[in-house]
Amino acid sequence: MLRGLDTHLRGCDNRGSFPRRRESRELDTRLHECDIAKGHFCAGGTCGSNITNASKRMGQYYVYILASQRNGTLYIGMTNDLIRRVWEHKQDLVEGFTKKYGVHRLVWYEPADEPLAAITREKQLKKWNRAWKLRLIEEMNPDWRDLYEDIVS
């Protein structure tokens, strides 16, 4: 996986946008070579992050669940910056499911040491039936409070 890493990192000069997942469907579970070294995701083989302090980001990945309300619509996601990502959902900056259905309440999250572990966990949770997801949320957050306020303070 790290073969050719030095060559790739020298070629990563696209800056200015926030981290994003690879767009390729055929390799959706494989990480781009620069992911581990830079702590971000690339789209289409071009780096899309301006993270300069990669060591600060390493080991900080999160799988999270947002809800519209108690026992409401659920959304499962993964990020390397939980505060930023939840804020984007709350501000409706992310086009798609969470904006369309008003899913803005952070009700569960779990840290992961590596991006591949977070991606695997996200995919695992997405395959779970709804009852298991509700039980997971209620074990951590029985009142379905918005945990965003806890992580920003």
Image (tube, rainbow, N blue to C red):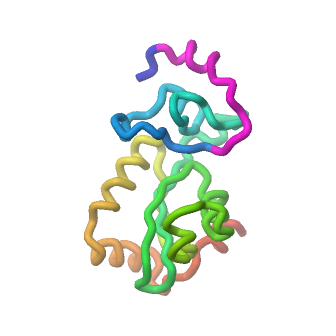
Q: Is residue 56 above or below residue 148?
A: above
Q: Quadrant of the C terminus?
A: bottom right
Out of 142 and 22, give the one closest to the viewer.
22
Q: What is the total number of numbered labels drawn onto the structure image?
A: 0
Residue at image position (41%, 48%) is 119
Location of residue 19 (image quadrant):
top right
Out of 52 and 28, give the one closest to the viewer.
28
Residue at image position (61%, 66%) is 89
Q: Position of residue 83 (x, y in %)?
A: 65, 60
Residue at image position (44%, 63%) is 76
Q: Position of residue 99 (x, y in %)?
A: 57, 70
Q: Is residue 147 above or below residue 18?
A: below
Q: Quadrant of the N terminus?
A: top left
In the rendered view, does 111 fall on the left or right side of 86? left
Q: Is residue 23 above or below residue 100?
A: above
Q: Where does the magenta region start and end?
A: 4-18
Q: Position of residue 50 (x, y in %)?
A: 71, 36
Residue at image position (33%, 77%) is 135
Q: Position of residue 100 (x, y in %)?
A: 53, 72
In the rendered view, does 108 fall on the left or right side of 94? left
Q: Is residue 62 above or below residue 131?
A: above
Location of residue 20 (image quadrant):
top right
In the rendered view, does 114 fall on the left or right side of 89? left
Out of 36 and 90, give the one closest to the viewer.
90
